[in-house]
Amino acid sequence: MSSSLETFEPYSRHVLIIVENLPVPLDRRVWLEATTLISAGYQVTVICPTGRGWEAEYEVIDGVHIYRYPAPPEAHSGAKAYAIEYSLALWHMLRLSIRVWRERGFEVIHGCNPPDLIWIIALLFRPFGVRYLFDHHDVCPELFEAKFGKKGALHKLMLWWERLTFACARTSIATNESFRQIAIKRGKMKPEDVFVVRSAPKVEKFEIRPADPELRKGFGTVLGYVGVIGQQEGMDLLIEAVDHLVNRAERPDIHALIVGFGPELERVKAEVISRQLDAHFTFTGALYGEDLLRALNSCDIGVAPDPKNAMNDISTMNKVMEYMTLEKPVVQFDLTEGRVSAGTAALYAKPNDPEDFAAKIAWLIDHPELAQDMGKRGRERVFSALSWEHSVPQLLAAYDRVFK
């Protein structure tokens, strides 16, 4: 394979996407990127872990070649646990990168964080003319701060890894403008090398359908949550809000439908039981495709209880976009990027105040016509500015830049 990239035309461009935290095609952002590149004439290979039902070591789906490695044990806490997880993942990603290089070749490594360590693999292939495009999924230093409530030496190490990531990247794509400013200011990248490619739903897959009475369980109002059930997602605040509505505001006709998985799931279930709220919560586990659509269509209000912290304030929440696409009014805490996403389609509670969160839910229940209008505005907002089709030109522009 030639080490010079200047003669490659778009139809001969080979891309290797590396992702550590979710298998593909389960990772919806990565899958949309991969299939969009395939549609544009690129050849795309993905390296990712196994898990969640995707166990084949190698397969081709919709033209995307997928190489999977055994998922290492997921770290929930502690530097040693994270070191083990990321070391094993890096070893497998490097091993499979060499295999892909020999079998298919590639000119660009598209690295998705976390962790901010894929630059190590990109650097090893740089002498062969391979360029690095960084896909900035999470702000890892802020994630560390939100997870452990402190900074310290490990926080400084993550800032250093982040800086090296940007230094090795020819081009970077950010999920929102806040992330773009980090790439420019903290990462020292040129503004013309950073592109905003928002995480957004593919709207044709999110059809509005009748609710499923079985999922609603006879309740008058159903709150919907979809996403990770982890330490920094604010499930404790949501439980407090429902507790306030049911037991203090005397609104027993409320049910919360919780869709998702994560390390805190069992603890959250135990908290619900300890507050004697188990009749007001249903935990479905992870749902995909038609099952997910059925669950979301059965909800009246989409909730995003992510607390305000250094990470959440500048992150785009995929669940908010999905609620909006299905015309669900949203209640969330007042976060910078949360307002950018939802605009007037959401009510914004005081940061990390579960009673005010409950009050916003109650207001929507008491004003059904206004809540319906909010839902319609949300869907219109997604279709007019935020759906995946609006991100496609930016993704392709980023790739034109990295090949330039």
Image (tube, rainbow, N blue to C red):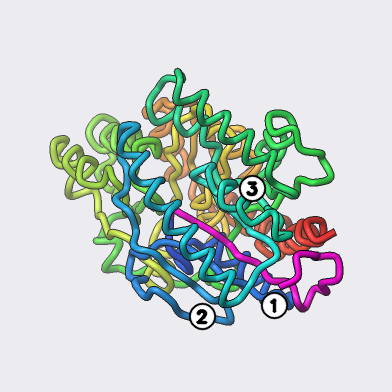
Q: What residue type is labelled 1?
A: Ser
Quarter of the figure with residue 125: bottom right
Q: How far apart are marks 3 and 1 (CA)?
A: 21 Å
Quarter of the figure with residue 64: bottom right
Is 163 placed left or right of 255 in the picture?
A: right
Q: Earlier in the sequence, mark 3 or mark 1?
A: 1
Mark 1 near mark 2, Cβ–Cβ under 8 Å? no
Give the image location of residue 92, x and y in percent.
Answer: 42, 59
Q: How far apart are marks 1 and 2 (CA)?
A: 13 Å
- Residue that mark 1 sits on: 39
Give the image location of residue 384, x and y in percent.
Answer: 73, 59
User: What is the secondary structure assignment of the residue under circle 1?
Assistant: helix
Q: How far apart are marks 2 and 3 (CA)?
A: 25 Å
The label number, if any, that marks residue 61 in the structure image: 2
The stretch in magenta equals 1-21
Q: Which amino acid does label 2 sit on?
A: Ile
